[in-house]
Amino acid sequence: MAVTDAASLLPFAAVVLPAVSIPLLYLARTRPNVREAVTLAAAAATLVVVWFMTESATTHVAALGSVAGVAFELRADAAGLLFALLAATLWVVTSVYSIGYVRTLDEHAQTRYFASFAASVAATMGVAFAANLFTLFVFYELLTLATYPLVAHAETREARIAARKYVAYTLGGGVVALGGVLLVAVLAGTVTFDAGGLSSLAAADPTLARVAFALLVVGFGVKTAVMPLHGWLPAAMVAPTPVSGLLHAVAVVKSGVFALGRTVLYVFGPETTWDLGMGLPLAVAAAVTMVLAGVVGLRQDNLKRGLAYSTVSQLSYVALGLALATPLSVFGAFVHVVAHAFMKITLFFVAGVVAAETGVKYVSDLAGIGRRLPLTMAAFGVAAAGLIGFPLVAGFVSKFHLVLGAAASPYPVFVAAYLLAGLLKLLYFWPVVYVAFFGRRGSDGSESEHAFAPPHATDGGYAAAATWERRTLGAETTPFMLLPVLFTVGAAVALGVAPTAFPFWDLANAVVAEVFG
C-alpha cells in the first residue's frame, strides 16, 4: 500500500479523462459507433489510471493551485482509491450496458446522455481524490449539476419535477455542508483531511465543533439519503435504468456516504466524534433509516421504487458503521460500499432488461418472467440474496463485519438493527424472486394460489391480461445488456467467496490502519 506522498498528475488525469471525452462525444454525435467507442475508451483509460495508482507504492498528490488561500488539491489515499476504483470499474460496465439500453429502446438525446455520464464520473473522481473539504465540496456540487440532465432525461413533466426536486435537495444540502466547511476552517485553521481527525478540532470550542459536525452530516446526509432527507431518491427513479444504477450504486449516493466517512474519520476523527456526543445521534438516525426504509419498501409495487428504498436502507448500513467508529465497523462500512455497489447495480441492470424486453415495470406483473429471462432473473436472485446477507455473496462478508463492529461497540444493541433490516430485505426480495420463477400468469384476474405474492400486489401476483413484448429475438436480451448483468453478479459472488483476492479488501484495511493506527 501507499506509504509516501509524491507529486503526480495521475489523480488529475483520472478527473480529466472523462471530462475530455465530452467534446469528443459531441463531435461524434452523428456517428453512434464512434461516439460509443469514445465512451468505452475514456472509461477504460480512467480505469487504467486508477488501477496504476492502486498498485503504486506511493500516494499520488496533484496540487492544482489555491482559491482564497485554500489549496485545491487531489490526493489518492486508500479511501479515495477504493471509491475511485469502484466508480471507474462500474463506469466501464455501465457504458457497455448503456449502449445496449439506448439502442434497444431507441432513446432520444443519446449524445447528451453519454456526455452527462462522463461529466458525472469526472466529478466522482474529484470527490474521491479530494485532499480537503474545500476540494470535496466543489466536486460534490459539480456532481449534482452533472447528474441533473440524466434525471431529467425523459423530458416528461414527471421527469422535470423529479429533477427539480433532486437539485433542490442536493444543492440545499450542499449549502448546509458549506457552512460546516467554513466553520471547520475557522475552528481548526485547516480543512485538509488527516487520518484520525484534525487534532485542532479536539481542542476547539465544543459547542461550535458540534455545530460544524451537524452541518456537515446534514449536508452530506442528503445524498446519503438519511431519513427524512431521502425524498429525492425514489422520485429520481424516472431516470433511465443505467442512470438509476449510477445514482444508487456508484456516483451520487456513494459520494454522500464517502463524504460522511471523510467527515467522521478524516476531519473530526472517531474519538472526537464520540467525545462531542455526536456519534450516538448519527448512529440512531442511521439505524432508524435502515429499518424504516425497509418497511416502506415492502409497500412498493414499482420495481425501481422498491430498489430505491432498499438503497436508502443499505446506505445507512454504511452510515451506522461509520458512526459506531470501531475498527471492525469502519472496515465493514468500506467493504459494504463495494459489495452494495455490485449487488445493487445488478438489480437495476435486471430491472432495465425486464423493462426493455417486456415492458414490465411492476412487481405485480412479474409472474413467471423468470422462464422468459432465466439468466437475468437468476442474477436478480443472487444479488438479492447478497443484499439480504446470505453467505457466498459479497453482502454477507460486509454485513458480517458490520455486525461484529456493532457488537464490539459501546452500544451492541445496534446489532438488532442490522438483523431486523436484513429480515425486511428478505420479506421484500423473496416474494419478487418467487413470483418471477413460480408465479402463474392469468387473464381472468383471479388470485394466484402461491403464498408469496407481493403484499403490494393488487392481483395476488398475476399479470392479468398482460402481453409481454419481446424486443430481442432468439435470446434473453442483447449481449450489451446481458453480459454486464452476468459480470456484476459474478463479481458479487467472487467478492463473497474470495474477498481478499481483490484490491478493495486491502484498501479497506489500509483505511482502518490510517485512521486507528
Image: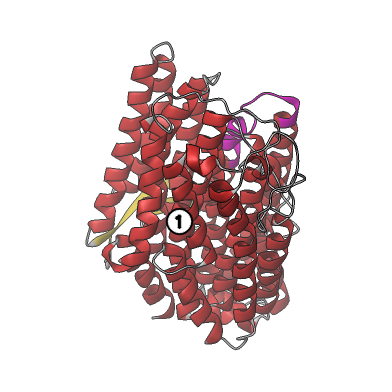
Counting labels gives 1
Residue at x-position 50% and y-position 44%: 370
Q: Quadrant of residue 500?
A: bottom left
Q: Quadrant of residue 474?
A: top left
- Any magenta on residue 152? yes
Disc 1 element? helix
Residue at x-position 48% and y-position 29%: 101
**Residue 210: percent from left, percent from top:** 69, 73
Q: Which residue is mark 1?
A: 382
The residue range painted magenta reads 144-158
**Residue 95: percent from left, percent from top:** 41, 34
Q: Quadrant of residue 324?
A: bottom right
Residue at x-position 70% and y-position 57%: 298
**Residue 84: percent from left, percent from top:** 40, 51
Visible residue check, residue 216: yes
* Amino acid identity at mark 1: Val
Q: Quadrant of the N terminus?
A: bottom left
Where is 139 relative to 386, above or below? above
Where is 455 relative to 141, above or below? below
Closer to us: 10 or 494: 494
**Residue 355: percent from left, percent from top:** 57, 33
Give the class, few, some or many, for how many residues have Cα within 10 Å of label 1's Cα (few <14, many ≥20). Answer: many
Q: Position of 252 compared to 447: left or right?
A: left
Closer to us: 87 or 452: 452
Q: Main secondary structure of the magenta part?
A: helix
Where is 326 relative to 179, above or below? below
Visible residue check, residue 250: no
Closer to us: 169 or 196: 169
